[in-house]
Image: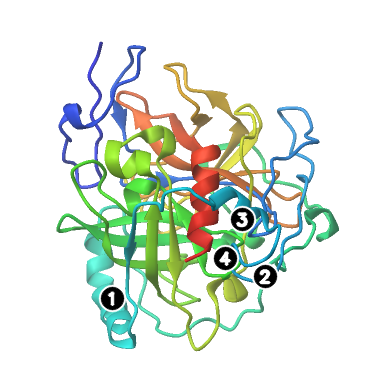
Amino acid sequence: MRSRRAYLERGEKVDPSRHPSRRRPGPTRLIAAALLAAAVGLVPAATPATPTALATPTTPPAPPEVIAAGDGAAGATPGDPDAAITRGRPAPPSATGAISAAEQERVARYWTAERRDRAFGSHSAAPQDAAGTAAPLSTPYGDDPGSGPAAAPPPPPSDGTRYTSGGLVTTTTGRLFSSIDGSDFACSASVVTSRGRDLAVTAGHCLHGGSGSGFATNVAFVPDYSDGETPFGIWTARHLTVTPGWARGSNFDVDTGFALFNTQRGRHLQDVVGAQGIAFDLPVSYQQYSFGYPRLHPFDGSALIYCAGPGAADSYGGPSIGVRCRMTAGSSGGPLIAGLGRLGPGHGWIDGVISYAYAGSDDRLFGTRFGDAVRLLYYQSSAF
């Protein structure tokens, strides 16, 4: 059986004994150029349900079955599906981020333009302390996706071109910066609908070093980064969670994490930039739109890049979603979105995050498909 090694953003090769191999042989897995990602959906923060009426694999899915939930914290409402899902389940691996005003300021100041430039897969945007003034683009918690804005045509097929179609995905997607084991990294992340209105999803390896390592520090998010601009400022994380399978076993099948962010001037992240929906257990063959900020050649990290085409299963086994895509380092954690445009321009359901690639392959990335483990983590993360 061929060994597998993860290629971290900094270029170090990880001891293959720390990464469980599948039962089937295959080429070495690489964490697609400096932390990649993907996810899909527009369903109530607390109650994303598995879509029940979906179109053919090459067309956007129909709105998922939606179960309305209360406005309180997870577990607070009688009959709340959040509580039913999380009750009696062990707490996920988690860590506290910047809580006090002084700590938040320290993290924001840490990510100077120079540090962001040096971070593997980073960008060179100038810092901005205050949130932008654009109108909120969020979907009210508990709204039925079917009642959203008119559907918009999705962008054309792509294997890695600059995204210029606009819409919600431009503000909800951004660069995620973190320090892991003494090195600075840059990933991609996406704001996802949640009860607290402060939640973003990314790859687990963007927030935690995996088996034998620990949680990231100095975690900050820059939504809607483009050509050096940071129109909505730098948001600092207050709480991090990853799946047990990633933290304890570096398992790429569940390479997902969530970050909760602090408010800025009393405003929640979701109220400022909007939020994508989320969906679970969608077939891997559905049309996928993946987004990220790759920095390695032929990209430079200055723009949001997208890939679009039908998803496919990993031929070496496992539940991951494969997509034709040339994105490189820096795209880790970027969202895989199904039904893009169905809920409005640039708006859909996140069903995975960019996670890895195989050695020797430069035209296909794989996203962690959102299944039961990520579903549980989503509800648990929303409750912090």
Position of residue 116 in the picture relative to residue 288 (left or right):
left
Position of residue 96 in the picture relative to residue 232 (left or right):
left
Q: Earlier in the sequence, mark 1 or mark 2?
A: 1
On-image quarter of the N terminus: top left
Cα separation between marks 3 and 4: 27 Å
What is the three-letter code of the residue carrying label 3? Asp
The residue beneath circle 2 is 137
Q: Earlier in the sequence, mark 2 or mark 3?
A: 3
User: Is disc 2 placed on a helix, strand or loop?
Assistant: loop
How packed is label 3: few (under 14 Cα within 10 Å), some, or many (20 or more)? Answer: many
Q: Earlier in the sequence, mark 3 or mark 4?
A: 3
Residues tagged 1 and 2 counted as in contact (Cβ below 8 A): no
What is the three-letter code of the residue carrying label 2? Leu
The residue beneath circle 4 is 171
**Depth order, front residue of 327/239:** 239
Residues tagged 3 and 4 counted as in contact (Cβ below 8 A): no
Cα separation between marks 1 and 3: 32 Å
Could one spot residue 376 in this view of the protein? yes
User: Is disc 3 placed on a helix, strand or loop?
Assistant: helix
Q: Nearer the viewer, mark 2 or mark 3?
A: 3
Residues tagged 4 and 2 counted as in contact (Cβ below 8 A): yes
Q: Is residue 16 above or below residue 242?
A: above
Tell me, for residue 107, which label it has, or none. 1
Q: Earlier in the sequence, mark 4 or mark 2?
A: 2
